Amino acid sequence: MAKKEAPKTTKKAAPAPAAKKGKAAPGKDSILAKAQAAREAARENAQDSISKDGLLKEVAKKLGIAKDDVQTVVDAFLDAAGQCLAAGAKVSIHGFGIFNTSVMAAREGKNPLTGEPMSIAESTRVTFKAASALKALVKE
């Protein structure tokens, strides 16, 4: 006897939320229009996540240049940003956010397996604070 396969179903995308009415700050109209267009394009190509390689392909396609050229620029940018953070400087990208470092003080913790108290050494962490433009882009 052959088994019958269940019919395949596809998820339908949720309808886009209604646009908020209100007056934008002067000079923000073009930014908001671009953000809206980007959101709509992103929804059409929605993914759970995208890798660095995926981003490189998107930028290369958008600019019409070779992916290798984009990779050279992105790698140089990431290297410079990493060097600045390692030196203790802030990396501020207008309209995107601010990368910074913060020192986490040494503290007492517990071993999750045994529950025994343990000492956690001081460490430096990278923090990110999103710019209001990025927050608005993600929110809508």
Image (cartoon, grey):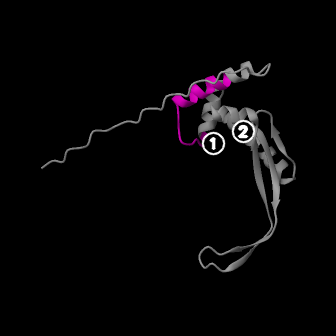
Query: Quick one: label 2, few (<14), some, or many (20+) residues within 10 Å?
Result: some
Residue type for callout 1: Lys
The quarter of the displayed image where residue 81 is located = top right
Residue most toward the left?
A: 1
For the residues marked 1 and 2, what is the alpha-carbon distance in whole angstroms?
9 Å
Residue 74 is marked as 2
Question: Answer yes or no: do the residues labelled 1 and 2 have beta carbons within 8 Å?
Answer: yes
Identify the main secondary structure in magenta.
Answer: helix
Residue at the spot 60% in from the left edge and 34% down from the top edge: 57
Span highlighted in magenta in the image: 34-53
**Residue 55 position in % (x across, y down):** 62, 37
Residue at the spot 55% in from the left edge and 28% down from the top edge: 17
**Is residue 7 found inside the magenta-colored segment of the image?**
no
SS category of the residue bearing label 1 = helix
Where 120 sits versus 67, above or below?
below
- Quadrant for the C terminus, please: top right
Residue 23 is marked as none
Name the residue tied to disc 1.
Answer: 52
**Residue 65 position in % (x across, y down):** 66, 27
Answer with mark 1 or mark 2, whichever residue precedes in sequence.
Answer: 1
Residue type for callout 2: Val
SS category of the residue bearing label 2 = helix
**Residue 91 position in % (x across, y down):** 82, 43
Query: Quick one: label 1, few (<14), some, or many (20+) residues within 10 Å?
Result: few
**Is residue 42 found inside the magenta-colored segment of the image?**
yes
Count of labels in the image = 2
